[in-house]
Image (cartoon, rainbow, N blue to C red):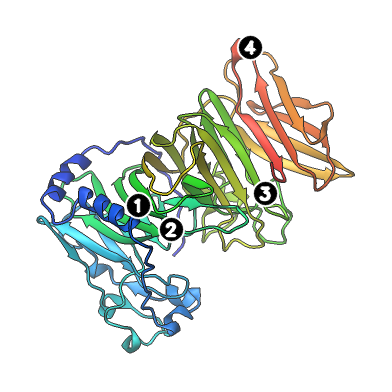
Amino acid sequence: MRARPVAAPWRWLIGIGCSLLLAVAQGADIGWPQVVQRARERAVAPYQPVPAPVPDWLLQLDYRAWQDIRFDPNVALWAGQDLPFTVRFHHPGSIYRQPVAISEIAAGQANLLGFAPSQFFYGPGVNRQRVPADLGYAGFTVYARGGDVWQPVLEFLGGSFMRAGAPLLAGGVRSRALAIDTGLPGGEEFPVFTDFWLLRPKADAKCLVIYALLDSPRVSGAYRIDLTTGGQVVTHVRSELFFRDGVGRLGLGPLSSMFWYGENGPTVDDYRPEVHSSDGLLIHAGKTRLWRPLNNLPRLGQQALPAPRGTSYGLLQRDREFGHYQDLDTAFEAQPGVWLEPQEGFGAGRLELLELPVRDELNQNVLAYFVPATEVHRGDHLSLRYRLSWGDREPDDGPGRVLATRVARRDGVNTYQIDFASLGAASDVPKPEISVQGGQADAPDLRPLADGWRLTLPVQYKDGAPLAIRASLLATGGVRSETWLYHLGDD
């Protein structure tokens, strides 16, 4: 089935009505306080990885064979019950090696949802008779009702990944619960969700509440996710984290995506002009708006950016023209972006952007996360609250947005061409403000382009050395464009 672009605009929603659902959980044998207590108790005990009872033959399935295993929507949770949400489940196998425990909270009780092979349609590569009756689920997808149509809007599948959007397209940007020691020489630790509880919604509910337990060798955590849908999908996240041991680098609110190539390179022999799920990192730090186009360079790149208290950020797909991708299956022009607004627990710190080199579109190679200034030690407790907004529009439409970045490299000179949107009613030619570290900037050229501006900036640069560039436009009355950032190498 071909994916279709998203036409509806985002609407900035808040989780109205979620508090009503909590009344159901208060009388349950497990509610939010009990989930937090379980996480706290886990953290004071030695880490115990959950055994994965998945047969080797299922793990050896290639990804296409796993995709041929399809859940029967007729037996989805809450199907046919005139509720605003239903839930479909995913089968373990291939790269999804770890089943998770999923329960429903209804009528004051939590009940574990039982796996059965009869709930799935199996492709020709799987013998249903060999599937264990107690295998469990790898994850789930939430569907929301819009009139007579059910759309997938939220998915938990693998590790601590969550992705959302309306509709939920293949691939795309994701959030993770935590990033631990990402980019450090000793290697990264990957926390995983082990348990979920789905609170049965009322017939007129505007949101769905989900509880989850997270675990890894150095941290245990309780998560509550409030999902609201409409023209935009919003997930309000609350977490209580308990640390078994210290963490070298803690990444809060990690967002990940895929960037193979775009209008800024690299050159790839492919029929599609661009292939990426996101094309930039947008940062709102106070009154400063920063746009960092994504790269796919020959070696790993890591950049740290100042993030004062209250900094919001997101991985976005700003280019929404089908002709720039020419992909009818993946619909990159319709891929949702995700925008994170911190509400509690982030404090002061820095943003880090990690970019891994890739040669295809199969793996997510971009990760952005917040590193708090305060170190985390054994026995620490951290409370977090933040909001994730998913969709095809940005949180605002300020003047001078960066529309495109192109790069030409020749004879030791990188020539950058940056297109800015209009700065508004200012009638004079704006003034470029440029800063270069690690290279030497030649005279810039600024010309009108449609109702915006094109800045051409040559930079003399020694290949392989670190390079950092900042460029913005300043017009009369103090109207300033976004600040365009470009970065090569490590900080």
Q: Camera-side residue: 222 or 199? A: 222
The residues tagged by marks 2 and 1 sit, at their Cα atoms, a distance apart of: 9 Å
According to the image, label 4 marks what residue?
476
Image coordinates for residue 377, horizontal then vertical, percent: 45, 46
Determine contact: label 4, label 1, CB under 8 Å: no
Residue at left 49%, top 41%?
Answer: 375
According to the image, label 3 marks what residue?
301
Crowd tier of the residue under label 2, counting other residues whose Cα lies within 10 Å: few below 14, some 14–19, many 20 or above: many
Q: Earlier in the sequence, mark 4 or mark 1?
A: 1
Image coordinates for residue 249, horizontal then vertical, percent: 53, 47
Q: Earlier in the sequence, mark 3 or mark 2?
A: 2
- Residue 375 left/right relative to 294: left
Image coordinates for residue 151, horizontal then vertical, percent: 33, 55
Q: Camera-side residue: 89 or 370? A: 370
Crowd tier of the residue under label 4, counting other residues whose Cα lies within 10 Å: few below 14, some 14–19, many 20 or above: some
Determine contact: label 2, label 1, CB under 8 Å: yes
Crowd tier of the residue under label 1, counting other residues whose Cα lies within 10 Å: few below 14, some 14–19, many 20 or above: many
Give the amino acid type for the residue marked by disc 4 in the picture.
Answer: Thr
In the picture, the disc for residue 106 is: none
According to the image, label 2 marks what residue?
191
The residues tagged by marks 3 and 2 sit, at their Cα atoms, a distance apart of: 23 Å
Q: Secondary structure at mark 4?
A: helix
The residues tagged by marks 4 and 1 sit, at their Cα atoms, a distance apart of: 50 Å
The residues tagged by marks 1 and 3 sit, at their Cα atoms, a distance apart of: 30 Å
Q: Quadrant for residue 11, please give it.
A: top left
Q: Secondary structure at mark 2?
A: loop
In front of the other: label 1 or label 3?
A: 1
User: Is the N terminus in the top left, top right, bottom left or bottom right quadrant?
Assistant: bottom left
